[in-house]
Image (cartoon, grey):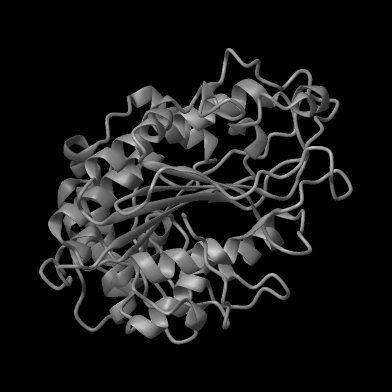
Amino acid sequence: MDKITRRRFLVASGVTVAAGATAYGIKDLLATAGERPADARTLVLVTLYGGNDGLNTVIPYADDAYAKARPQLAYDADKVLKLDDHFGLNPGLAGLHKLYGEKKLAIVRGVGYPKPDHSHFRSMDIWQTAQPDRPGTTGWLGRWLDAAGGDPRLAVSFEPVLPPLLTGAQSAGATVPGGAVKLPASVTPALLRQLGTPVAGESPALARAATCFADLMRVQDLMADVSLSSSDDDQDAAATATGGAAPPLDQQLALVAKCVEAGAATRVFSVSLGGFDLHADEKSAQETLLARLDKPLSAFVERMAGKGVVVAVYSEFGRRVRANASEGTDHGTASNILLAGDGIPGGLYGEAPSLTDLDDGDLKFTVDFRDVYALLLQDVLGSDPARALGGWKGRLKFS
């Protein structure tokens, strides 16, 4: 088959040849089984794109200032899933609430960084590069990957585009295609086999893309066996919420679980859920989105128990304390990070920001996100945090 035609087909089908030849298939990851040290732990980073409203996620229901600032958005005390006499979880987070009750979920409040930025893009760059003063061109986990040897299969994203956080100075993580492929009726099974077979004399990157395309077809069949129990309606809704940018979260986490259970060498996985930029009609929409996070995530945490897996959930910023005129919230600052998995003691950590002592309407952060990253780098990845965080000395402590 003509390589140009084949290349165009691969690109049109959603399998792109990433810079640095970082496109891999699930088969490439599973082929590393046995290469992983017995005591190695795994970090799964869940990004909530759009700026999740932290105050309606971990709800300060007993604070009068909460209801006063957002009368139409605030949850009454009898609606929240209570954590203690002051805070509770959003009603959409029943699975995570159960994990909290079993001391398996840590909630870090007031997480942010100095001189916060309200831009989605710049704030996400700051979070992913861990460089608040001037976001650079490498991610904090990309710099970890440089130090860990640079094999792309050590740091994998199941998103269609490699996130900046997995880009290092000398290396980059891998993207693994997922989701559904829609093909013309004229494309026969025999033609698919041709399109997914490397051609003699082509570049290594194009050969890998062909392998990824063939693997993408296998992934769709694999989903029936490894699904984390979301219904078809849940998957369709999640795909809508992410704007089609990534496979539904349950599928991403199912692939992570498959790799972990197979003993793949991958140490870091990046997955995501989008749709959290809710400037209007926020309350029910956010609760629905959080339920789509909760169901697969809580199932994943339970499934991975005892396998050395730690999950961290974050968003690029929280929202303003006061609701806007459209029953939504605008871009804010400090929010929560959720941590779960082996070795993570459940509980509330970090000082909850004041709802009245504000910075021009925004929450003042009480925990620098690099403190959380330092914990993950040292305790989960066994790496010196200062090396990946530009000499940063802080660290989140659970005691």
Picture coordinates of residue 7, whole percent (x, y): 36, 67
Looking at this view, name the residue that lies furthest to the front. 399
Report whether 326 appears left or right of 144: right
Picture coordinates of residue 349, whole percent (x, y): 54, 48
Residue 125 sits in quarter: bottom right
Picture coordinates of residue 362, whole percent (x, y): 81, 46
Looking at this view, name the residue that lies furthest to the top. 78
- In the rendered view, tell whether residue 270 sits above or below residue 322: below
- In the rendered view, tell whether residue 391 sits above or below residue 276: below
Which is nearer the eye, 230 or 41? 41
Quarter of the image that includes the N terminus:
bottom left
Residue 287 visible in the current orientation? yes
Looking at this view, name the residue that lies furthest to the left. 34
Report whether 109 appears left or right of 193: right
Going 31% across and 82% down the picture, which residue do you hit? Answer: 203
Report whether 139 appears left or right of 12: right
Which is nearer the eye, 112 or 138? 112
Residue 69 sits in quarter: top right
Picture coordinates of residue 51, whole percent (x, y): 65, 45
Residue 183 visible in the current orientation? no
Going 28% across and 71% down the picture, which residue do you hit? Answer: 208
Which is nearer the eye, 169 or 362? 362
Going 83% across and 30% down the picture, which residue do you hit? Answer: 324
Looking at this view, name the residue that lies furthest to the right. 360
